[in-house]
Image: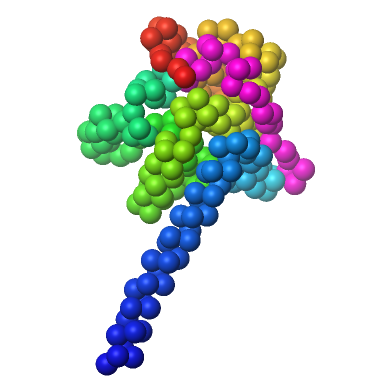
Amino acid sequence: MKAVWRLSRWALAVPVLIVIAWQGWYLGWVVWWKFVNPATTSFMALRLDELREKDPRAELKKQWTTYERISVNLKRAVVAAEDAKFSEHEGFDWEGIQKALEKNQKKGRIVAGGSTISQQLAKNLFLSGSKTPWRKAQEAVITLMLETLWDKRRILEVYLNVVEWGGGVFGAEAAARHYYGVAAAQLSAEQAARLAVLLPNPRKFGRLPNSPYLAARSQVILGRMNSADIP
């Protein structure tokens, strides 16, 4: 009986230890990236693999730029478009999640996500775009790590530098140069609003950045930008 009891304890302990070690791996990277800028992300690697299936020589367009050298217009536009309560919440916008659930139930399919900038960053840095319960649970854990160990300024800085803005286009600097031929620091309010509207579906919207729908949506964001609270 003692032998069976020991085996049972080990059978329970081993999975727990594996999960703890796995979370420790994520935590280590979160601590490292608090001080060191990420050279690449899980999403970047995924997109590069997809591009190289068509062209083995394909490269991503990306260039890191500091928080100070990103236009205030773009910071305001992204917060207004993606996460109006960014400066207030601790990683999760529960009201936004509830509204998204209600909208999805009404439509009978997933049409809204309710993810905050912190959640999107957790996904972009480490995870895939799948919508499995496990992936969402892991995203929540990493979001808590980011919100606990980083300040809002660092979260927004990294997000703006790693988020996808079109096929193979990552980060504010590459996006500003790709779409407008200017540095991220030089983006006007209207240009920033037009970039922000691409974020929900950058590969689709990036092919038609001047469509009537995106133009109308950018005007809505433009009207919200002055009230956007940024770190």
Seen in the picture, residue 73 relative to 45 is either above or below; the reply is above
Seen in the picture, residue 76 relative to 142 is either above or below; the reply is above
Seen in the picture, residue 166 relative to 23 is either above or below; the reply is above
Q: Quadrant of residue 55?
A: top right
Decide whether residue 77 is among the magenta residues. Answer: yes
Q: How is the image coloured?
A: rainbow
Residue at 32 percent across and 81 percent down: it is 8
Q: Is residue 58 left or right of residue 32?
A: right
Decide whether residue 107 is among the magenta residues. Answer: no
Query: Which region shows up in magenta?
Result: 55-78
Residue at 35 percent across and 84 percent down: it is 7
| Residue 180 can be seen, yes or no | no
Q: Quadrant of residue 219?
A: top left
Quarter of the rendering occupied by the N terminus: bottom left
Image coords of residue 74 (percent x, y)? 53, 16
| Residue 89 can be seen, yes or no | yes
Image coords of residue 215 (percent x, y)? 48, 12
Residue at 38 percent across and 54 percent down: it is 134
Q: Nearer the viewer, residue 175 or 40?
A: 40
Q: Nearer the viewer, residue 231 or 82?
A: 231
Image coords of residue 39 (percent x, y)? 66, 39
Residue at 72 percent across and 38 percent down: it is 59
